[in-house]
Image (tube, helix red, strand yellow):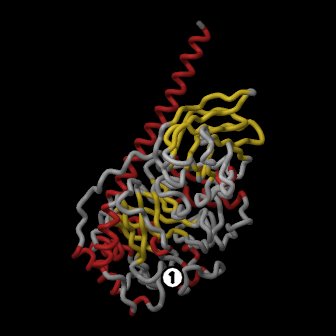
Amino acid sequence: MVIKKLQLLLLLTLFGISSVFAQDAKHLKQLQQQFVDLRFGMFIHFNIPTYMDADWPDPEASPALFNPTKLNCDQWAKAAKSAHMTYGCLTTKHHSGFCIWDTKSTDYNVMNSPLKRDVVKEYVDAFRANGLKVMLYYSILDTHHKLRPNQIQPSHIEMIKTQITELLTKYGKIEALIIDGWDAPWSRISYDDVPFEDIYHLVKKLQPDCLLMDLNGAKYPGQGLYYTDIKTYEMGAGQRMQKESNYMPSLACLPIQSSWFWKTDFPSTPVKDAAKLVNDQLITLNNDRCNFILNVAPNRDGLFDDNALAGLAAIGKIWKNEGPVAPIGDIDAPIISSNLAKNAPANSSWSDDMNISDFANDDNFGTSWMSNPAVKQPWYEISFKRETGLNTIVIAESKANINKYKLEYFAGGAWKPILDGEKTGRIKVHRFNRIWANKIRMQILGSENTPSIAEFQVYNEQR
């Protein structure tokens, strides 16, 4: 009787964990749909780079440079309204570390500039007063505070947490926090150097309805959400969504001018053509469940140039917001934790000579393990140095091919089942209640062609 009661309690506990996770995923999907339904917004790159004619300025530049004597965030908001935009997103801190809000985390901030005004507060107040939603941009890379590759200290992570806490507690409801400078080839700060999962949970704790977007997910397949609530595409960097087949909630960004921050030639240089922006970008992207954010850079007075204002008004004459876009597809909650399988010892059944087992856990989606065609029941295996807790396995293929498989774990001297899988998509996400294992194995029971795995990933999510 006691054993039966314990078994029932365990089942109820596991069901409760599963139910809570499902509820969270459902809530996230609602927020993702609401975001893409916004269709069109304004990026605003405004910071120390505005005064140095460079997107990446000297990280020791004096706060005295930041002096927008005619700063008028209401002008920005009305310009956004003229283009029928629905929200704005302001660069609270860019890569050189200058904060344009009243922060207690560093002296390198706007209150020590000639302006001595909280720009973030003026921005959120103006946009809300004009009926627009507000989002914030924040850079993890911070060259002024030496938060860069191979130099990250615990104090840096505490600074990040303090700054994000300020941004999400002092300014009311923030629809999304767009993060940059993380896991990018040019920043080289990994999701382990600054633990993504900790920051993600902090954001959700402070504002459960705030989406977290990371702009640097280009290396990850478009069919899966890795380290972001929304797939992002920086079009100026050559990133492009797979059109006419996208079912993910997405964001694409471009500047209306030639670069992100204001340059001295902007007033005399034509902005991008309004009709092309509407027809080639905005409409096309919206039709594929992708929100479009167009950057407009304020000048050194803190105002938009006349040609930028005219360009936004021209967009508004051509395009009207028609409301919700097509529903997003059934998608898995994002991967947010560290990959335990990365570079771990790997083994497999007989493989193709040039595509051996370690190519499937090298954190590179451009390489793959491939079974030798002669093998009838291929298998792939990851070993851990010690017994390891895990609750998520992701199989990422170069092309959707494998359609029937088993996942097993080795513990206590024997192989034990995790699940039988029949997912057919390119990214196969499996979440289950935590187990402890020395090894993980995938047995491939069915595939359309020779089985191949780009990345076999293992996670122990905080849940």
Pick the front one: 277 or 141: 277
Pick the front one: 44 or 368: 368
The residue lying furthest to the top in this view is 1
Q: Is residue 26 above or below residue 249?
A: above
Residue ID at (55%, 32%): 419
Residue 89 screen position, x and y as percent: 43, 67
In the rendered image, the quadrant that contains the N terminus is top right
Pick the front one: 168 or 330: 330
Residue 105 screen position, x and y as percent: 62, 63
Residue 342 screen position, x and y as percent: 68, 51
Q: Is residue 97 above or below residue 134?
A: below
Residue ID at (47%, 83%): 262
Residue 271 screen position, x and y as percent: 36, 84
In this figure, what is the number of numbered marks?
1
Q: Is residue 104 above or below residue 208?
A: below
Occupied quadrant, residue 307? bottom left
Q: Is residue 198 visible?
A: no
Type of amino acid at the residue the image marks with label 1: Thr
Callout 1: SS: helix
The residue lying furthest to the front in this view is 374
Residue that numbered label 1 is attached to = 50
Occupied quadrant, residue 293? bottom left
Mark 1 Cα-neighbour bin, 10 Å: few <14, some 14–19, many ≥20: many
Residue ID at (27%, 74%): 82
Answer left or right for 366 relative to 149: left
Q: Is residue 385 visible?
A: yes
In the rendered image, the quadrant that contains the C terminus is top right
